[in-house]
Image (cartoon, rainbow, N blue to C red):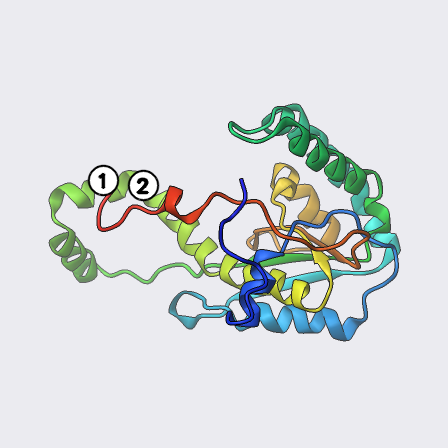
Amino acid sequence: MNSPLPVDDSTDPALFATMSTMRAMRRLKPEPVPEALLDRLIQAAVWGPSGGNMQRYEYVVVTDPAVMASLAPLWKRCVDAYLATTGKYAPDGMDEAAYGRMVAAIEYQRDHFAETPALIIPCYRFPEPRIEQEGLLRYAEALGAEATARMGKTQERFAALAEGSCVYPGVQNMLLAARGLGLAANITIWHLMLEEEWKAALGIPEDMNTFAAIPVGWPQGRFGPVSRRPVDEVVHRDRW
């Protein structure tokens, strides 16, 4: 699946070339990443939007080799669980050889996780909503009875998406910033299989949710064009 759009068109803003060559880079050199560069990644994340501009995000940045080594067994357990289930087979439509290369990179990262120069854990604590009876009545009136009943069944999903929407735009900013600075990074959520253990290992408060584990370092390989579905396959204009 190769995008028909050029990745080096001189008329495009530089950001387009950054996005179109932002591969998930899992093979990292063990050399440390300067703290100033990691701060720039967090700054890029902070520039991202958050619901109601509440800015209730926090970021745990791990660079201590001893702490990283203590996290390596947790990472291995999560990766092994993923590769035994969801990641066991190539997704529909994906070339088997390409998937094999991706799995090899995942296994390399698993086996060398203790050497990861930096790991960033984005966190968010959504506040308890302040809703009064009058507000609930207006809410129901605005939605209508049928939609209000449906929302009662999907409230948990709505809350999860609301919280995630306050975090993931910043995460994407961080990944773009890493690519722009020549750093390798990739977003994972496998740690959620053992989230309590990760939070305990890093001293993250129980009421704080974690949304990703992002290894960061200098890439062993080169950045290059990503393989994605073409635009005309994914767009539904005006209606499905």
Q: CA distance from mark 1 to mark 2?
A: 6 Å
Q: Is residue 41 left or right of residue 142?
A: right
Q: Amino acid at mark 1?
A: Arg
Q: Position of residue 140 (x, y in %)?
A: 15, 52
The residue sitting at 52% across, 29% down in the picture is: 93
Q: Position of residue 227 (x, y in %)?
A: 57, 45
Q: Position of residue 236 (x, y in %)?
A: 29, 46
For the residue pair 15 and 126, the one nearer the viewer reads as 15
What number is the disc on residue 170?
Answer: none
Q: Residues within 10 Å of mark 1 (few under 14, many from 20)?
A: few
The residue sitting at 65% across, 51% down in the picture is: 23
Figure quadrant of residue 110: top right
**Which residue is labeled 1 in the image?**
150
Looking at the rendering, in which quadrant would you find the C terminus? top left
Question: Badges 1 and 2: C-beta atoms under 8 Å apart?
Answer: yes
Q: Residues within 10 Å of mark 2 (few under 14, many from 20)?
A: few
Q: Amino acid at mark 2?
A: Thr
**Which residue is labeled 2 in the image?**
154
Q: Secondary structure at mark 2?
A: helix
Q: Is residue 210 left or right of residue 28?
A: left
The residue sitting at 40% across, 55% down in the picture is: 162
Q: Is residue 122 left or right of residue 132?
A: right
Q: Is residue 215 above or below residue 234?
A: below
Total marks drawn?
Answer: 2
